Image (cartoon, rainbow, N blue to C red):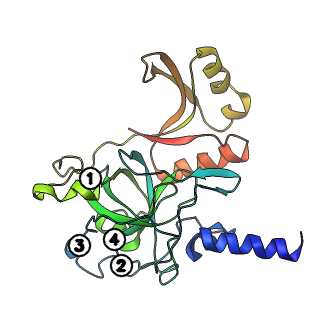
């Protein structure tokens, strides 16, 4: 590859991703979310204010139509209206504190911000800890996380307030907020507030495929290469058109660490088209 091409590629990466994103893409023996922050009780997490949704134009940086990471194509959404997704949240802290985010802002691990792969920058989202019912509001200003199975990378202080900082990850639901209507009549436009729950049962699965024909689902579930990794089962159901659909899943999985181990083995054996289901 010529020197000019190398320089061009480097410039494109710098424009598309933050310094923290590029660092995350480097090979490492550490876990993807391995990072550090102040002591967990460095401040009273109850006085940390949520991000306040407000109408903002899309950032000039960080909003390409699409981009490619590790051979996977990501498409940035035109808008965030109606976005709701469940998955695993991680966090990043002092390792990237003070570096530029994807939209050119400086990452502050004490600010209520987050990184997301496809939501427009900026987008305000409400994040719910599915184990406890605790919710926070953060502002998306960065790209990531690119670890398999993660849907949002919270700032350190956001993860602390949500209650996921100690474990490093947590099962969450992410809901986009419409800033134009959020403050009307003093009410939020997000999910109604639920009673704060302790130890709510959460089931984690890895879904490897969904098929209209059962025998195709059986072929995947009984694949000899898959059998040596984990036992898969077929879950029957119906799609949005009320037609039968057969989903091939692994689980329930008790912890995120076990899920990561299974996911790594799946990828190493050529099963890389799967995603996390939380119920």
Instruction: Name the one closer to the observer, 71 or 28.
Output: 71
Dots 2 and 4: beta carbons under 8 Å?
no
Q: Which residue is mark 2?
A: 110
Q: Which residue is mark 1?
A: 132
Question: In whole angstroms, how far apart are the C-alphas of marks 2 and 1?
Answer: 22 Å
Determine the residue positioned at 64% across, 50% down. Answer: 73
Q: Quadrant of the N terminus?
A: bottom right
Instruction: Name the one closer to the observer, 89 or 254.
Output: 89
Q: Earlier in the sequence, mark 4 or mark 3?
A: 3
Question: In whole angstroms, how far apart are the C-alphas of marks 1 and 4?
Answer: 19 Å
Question: In whole angstroms, how far apart are the C-alphas of marks 2 and 3?
Answer: 11 Å
Question: In whole angstroms, how far apart are the C-alphas of marks 2 and 4?
Answer: 7 Å
User: In the rendered view, would you say 59 is above or below 70?
Assistant: below
Instruction: Name the one closer to the observer, 1 or 137.
Output: 1
Q: Which residue is mark 3?
A: 49
Q: Residue 235 at x, y = what percent?
A: 49, 23
Q: Which residue is mark 4?
A: 112
Determine the residue positioned at 26% across, 53% down. Answer: 132
Q: Earlier in the sequence, mark 2 or mark 1?
A: 2
Q: Earlier in the sequence, mark 2 or mark 3?
A: 3
Kind of element beneath mark 3: loop
Question: In whole angstroms, how far apart are the C-alphas of marks 4 and 3?
Answer: 8 Å
Quadrant housing residue 181: bottom left
Dots 2 and 3: beta carbons under 8 Å?
no
Q: Quadrant of the C terminus?
A: top left
Kind of element beneath mark 2: loop
Within 10 Å of disc 4 (Cα), the crowding (few <14, some 14-19, many 20+) is many
Dots 4 and 3: beta carbons under 8 Å?
yes
Within 10 Å of disc 2 (Cα), the crowding (few <14, some 14-19, many 20+) is some
Q: Is residue 132 left or right of residue 203?
A: left
């Amino acid at each position: 590859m010529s020197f000019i091409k190398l320089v061009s590629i480097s410039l494109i990466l710098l424009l598309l991703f933050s310094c923290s994103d590029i660092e995350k893409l480097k090979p490492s023996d550490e876990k993807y979310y391995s990072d550090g922050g102040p002591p967990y009780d460095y401040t009273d997490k109850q006085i940390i204010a949520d991000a306040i949704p407000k109408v903002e134009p899309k950032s000039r940086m960080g909003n390409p139509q699409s981009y490619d990471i590790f051979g996977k194509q990501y498409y940035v959404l035109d808008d965030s209206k109606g976005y709701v997704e469940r998955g695993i949240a991680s966090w990043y802290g002092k390792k990237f504190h003070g570096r530029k985010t994807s939209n050119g802002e400086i990452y502050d691990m004490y600010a209520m911000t987050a990184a997301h792969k496809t939501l427009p920058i900026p987008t305000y989202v409400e994040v719910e800890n599915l184990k406890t019912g605790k919710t926070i509001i953060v502002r998306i200003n960065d790209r990531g996380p690119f670890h398999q199975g993660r849907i949002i990378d919270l700032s350190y202080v956001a993860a602390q307030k949500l209650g996921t900082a100690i474990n490093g990850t947590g099962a969450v639901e992410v809901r986009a907020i419409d800033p134009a209507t959020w403050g009307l009549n003093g009410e939020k436009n997000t999910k109604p507030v639920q009673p704060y729950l302790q130890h709510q049962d959460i089931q984690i699965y890895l879904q490897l495929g969904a098929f209209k024909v059962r025998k195709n689902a059986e072929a995947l579930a009984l694949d000899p290469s898959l059998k040596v990794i984990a036992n898969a089962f077929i879950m029957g159901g119906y799609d949005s058109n009320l037609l039968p659909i057969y989903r091939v899943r692994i689980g329930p999985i008790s912890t995120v660490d076990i899920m990561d181990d299974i996911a790594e083995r799946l990828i190493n054996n050529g099963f890389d088209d799967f995603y996390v289901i939380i119920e």
